[in-house]
Image (tube, rainbow, N blue to C red):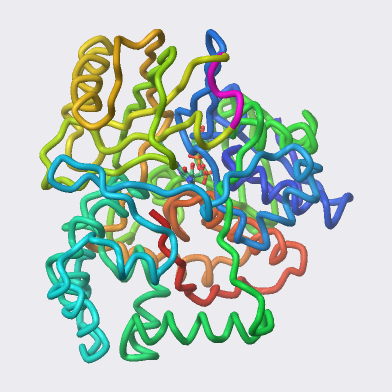
Amino acid sequence: MHHRKDTIIIGAGLTGLVIGHKLKHQHPGHQLMVLEKSARAGGVISSFTENGYLAESGPHGFLDNCIESRELLQETGLETECVRASLQTFVRYVCIDSKLMMIPQSPLKIIRAPLIPWKDKFRVAGELFKEPLAGEPTVAKWAEYRFGKALLPYVDAVFTGTYAGDYNELKIDAVMPGVRQMEQEHGSIIRGVLAKILQARKKKGNKQKLSMPSMTSFPDGMARLPQRLAEILGPESISFNCEVTGIQKDAKGWLVETVHDTYQTANLVLALPVNQGLRLLTAVDDTSPLQQIPEAWIATVVFGFEGATLPPGFGFLIPEREQRFTLGTLFSSNMFPNRAPNGHIIFETLVGGRRHPERLELDDETLIQDALTDVKGLLALPHNPTYTRVLRPAGGIPQLEKGYPQLLKWRNDLVRENPGLYVCGFGWEGIGLNDMIKTACSVGETIISQTTQIQEQAEAKKIYF
Ligand SMILES: Cc1cc2nc3c(=O)[nH]c(=O)nc-3n(C[C@H](O)[C@H](O)[C@H](O)COP(=O)(O)OP(=O)(O)OC[C@H]3O[C@@H](n4cnc5c(N)ncnc54)[C@H](O)[C@@H]3O)c2cc1C
């Protein structure tokens, strides 16, 4: 069958759902269809409940410091449902020499904390006098050049926590374009950050303290967000079990081939992770500088304990040099209420990542045992867990490594040369939920206004451990 729509969106992950929602919200008459290969909405977002425990196999939450995400919560009515954990009150830890070092959340306290020796703190301050680093350095190379060696384990921890990545492979220009821009504009990151703080203070009025954002989720977990978006879009606008097998340009716009039907549309949105998007795009343009990019896959090992307590805070991250089995642990029952039965705690331990895909080959029982042995070396856990479960996410985390800036340029040229084509999703404009929501809002706006897509200015995001 041949269907005609104003807009076809491929993928009902968060990106595709938000674009669909924005189009419907601002233009109820807009004829759209979201085509989803699987039987459910949400993509890698997936919450898991069992025996009174609630865990996530994908994202655990997003920070409420993004205007577009806050607006989305208002528009969907989720603002009144969501649960928040403020970074002001929740610390995190980084494992250094087999001990958990607490990372305070304010810059002044970080400077005073015994995280690195004083001589290395002076080296960090020397960043003020470093020229911008030329070329396309990796995160590790760039961080060492600007701040010195002593900070590297902490930088590694940040990129383990966000990308499950290897900071010797990730490119700084790809993962932190805003920070690189700051380096160019201010000649120093410290100077750039101070300028930003002063600017924000001026905006708020000098006397008001700048507040920290909160990690945001929902009482039944992150799956509530795509579930609500799918509910608002309605069954008439989403087709499940409907894999797109091919796309091509035609005289009136785009033809989209699915396992069941063919669609003709003026606007075609690929709301897919980079690799899945690239596979479909070869039919439109086969000159992509990369056929695919690496992905980091992880497994989440969920532990429930009766009568145990966790240290205060969100959890801890482990740099590679510690040579441990796990990447880090989230103290889920500290973050959000009702994640474990009364008198119990739950924490979720991450394994695998870019550096250790071989660990994901292990069976569940071995993963649980090895993860437990590792965690017991860092947390005081008096007895064996009352609950364990291994969760394996539906997708890997795109890694923005060698060749990624060229790939992004190719994508930008492609959409510029093909009006009505939109390529976004996991890995293109970042990897976090806020990045997806921000880009999805901008794509929705562009389709509605039928203007050419404006490339967003890179933003220097704050780092929270
Ligand atoms: C393990 C893990 C932990 C994470 N933790 C966090 C976190 O704590 N905080 C945070 O901000 N972000 C986190 N993220 C990132 C966040 O989850 C993603 O940014 C976001 O969910 C990506 O949404 P998406 O819609 O772009 O892609 P996806 O969720 O991958 O959705 C793409 C959809 O497209 C469908 N699809 C694919 N091919 C086709 C086809 N040919 N035809 C039709 N449909 C197709 C897929 O089935 C899928 O439903 C995490 C990601 C992972 C994997």
The residue at the point 25 percent across, 43 percent down is 100
Residue 406 visible = no
Find residue 117 and report its horizontal and vertical position in percent: 15, 67
The residue at the point 80 percent across, 32 percent down is 234
Of the pair 393 and 104, the residue shown nearer to us? 104
Residue 177 visible = yes
Determine whether, in the image, residue 75 is placed left or right of residue 101: right
The residue at the point 39 percent across, 8 percent down is 386
The residue at the point 50 percent across, 29 percent down is 333
Outermost residue on the right side: it is: 29
Find residue 237 and report its image quarter. top right
Q: Quadrant of the N terminus?
A: top right
Find residue 54 and report its image quarter. top right
Q: Is residue 203 magenta?
A: no
Find residue 151 and report its image quarter. bottom left
Find residue 37 and report its horizontal and vertical position in percent: 54, 29
Find residue 183 and report its horizontal and vertical position in percent: 33, 84
Of the pair 28 and 51, the residue shown nearer to us? 51
Above or below for 266 versus 458: above
Find residue 358 and report its horizontal and vertical position in percent: 16, 28
Determine whether, in the image, residue 14 is placed left or right of residue 115: right
Determine whether, in the image, residue 282 is placed left or right of residue 233: left
Magenta residue span? 337-341
Of the pair 138 and 265, the residue shown nearer to us? 138
Determine whether, in the image, residue 406 is placed left or right of residue 215: left
